[in-house]
Image (cartoon, grey):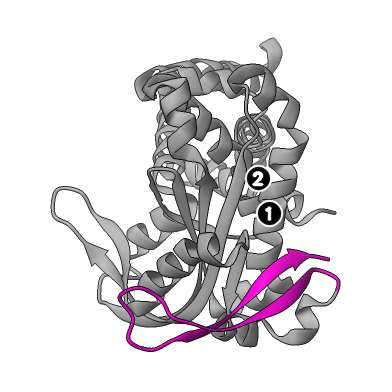
Amino acid sequence: MAALHRERVRLYLWIVILSGLIGVLYNVASNPWPPPARDLQIGLVDGTLIAAGIGFIEVFLVNAGRLRWLASLPFIGVVALKTLVYGAIVLAVLTRWGTAAPTGFAIGFSMFVTFSFVVAMQIATLLGFRTARDLLLGRYRQPRRERRFFLFVDVAGSTGIAERLGPLEAHRFLAAVFAAAAEPVAACRGEVVQYVGDEVVITWTEAAGAVEARPMRCFFGIESSLLRQEREFEERFKTRPGLRAALHFGEVIAGEVGVWRRAIVFHGDVMNTASRLENATREVGARFIASDEALQALGGPALQGIANCRDLGALALRGRSEAIRAYAIESS
């Protein structure tokens, strides 16, 4: 089973289990103590069936990108549409297709939970699931040191493409490139830190990134995804997107910032160096550069069969006093 599919199955199972527990807790709270065993079973079955339908749509259709037309709707439109559709599923389960008559309170409670779920999923999609989780749990409320990989991926020739297409079509072009990158990033458990113009920054903790050389696989996966959609880009934008990228590893300070808008940010020389390595790809004629620190952290055996590394020696980077040893990376 593919890694991304395993993640979706895991998320789906968590949704189903949580919903079943909510159904049981509702019947515990709404019945005299001790609640009848039959009512607990009904709550468990109702919660599980509701989540089975809603979770399938959310995880395997919406999040898998099979309903891309939803992206054209505003946030409130998506929330309203999902609430209506999911509400119909709730009513279908609670009424048992005419075999039971749920109370108004039961219907209202289920609709409230459904609406809350829809809003939470939409917010998590905007922020990123891991970022939303970390903000909710306050993981970075106090700054902390972390050792992380940072992958900077830039769309090559974007300035010329923007001049030819115009600002509106150039935006749509970049949006299509980033959409193609979404699946490989998710499959490799990467976290999108930010989109900056024609560049996306992706990160992994040391433990997460070292598994199967995920940062390497991520970049090559993005390239493969764009290659599969090459004809679509040619037909729509009359161009084929190319990429430049750089990978670096080291210690950063991670923490929450902001008052009116909270965000988790990373500070440290690692990100600056990764950005300058990405700029150096033009000078050394390589589309993908990785620092020696990144390769050491990934481990040599993990790269076998994934990437070929060509030693570029010590590169002098603009704004950095010390040169950094780097390698040009090609897929095996």
Instruction: Classify the position of the N terminus by image quarter.
Output: bottom right
**Crowd around label 1: few <14 · some 14–19 · many ≥20 (10 Å):** some
The amino acid type, in three-letter code, at marker 1 is Ala
271 in magenta: no
Q: Identify the residue under disc 1.
A: 187
Mark 1 in CB contact with mark 2 (< 8 angstroms): yes
What secondary structure is marked by label 2?
A: helix
Q: Nearer the viewer, residue 18 or 247?
A: 247
Residue 187 relative to residue 228: left or right:
left
Where residue 113 appears, x then y in whole percent?
A: 44, 34
Residue 137 relative to residue 111: left or right:
left
Q: Residue at x 32, y 86 (%)?
A: 321
Q: Nearer the viewer, residue 253 or 171?
A: 171
Q: Identify the residue under disc 2.
A: 183
Where residue 110 appears, x then y in whole percent?
A: 48, 29
Residue 307 drawn above or below residue 299? above
The amino acid type, in three-letter code, at marker 2 is Glu
Instruction: Classify the position of the C terminus by image quarter.
Output: bottom right
Where residue 306 appears, x then y in whole percent?
A: 80, 68
Q: Nearer the viewer, residue 107 or 317?
A: 317
Q: Residue at x 35, y 73 (%)?
A: 318
Magenta segment range? 305-332
Q: Residue at x 74, y 65 (%)?
A: 330
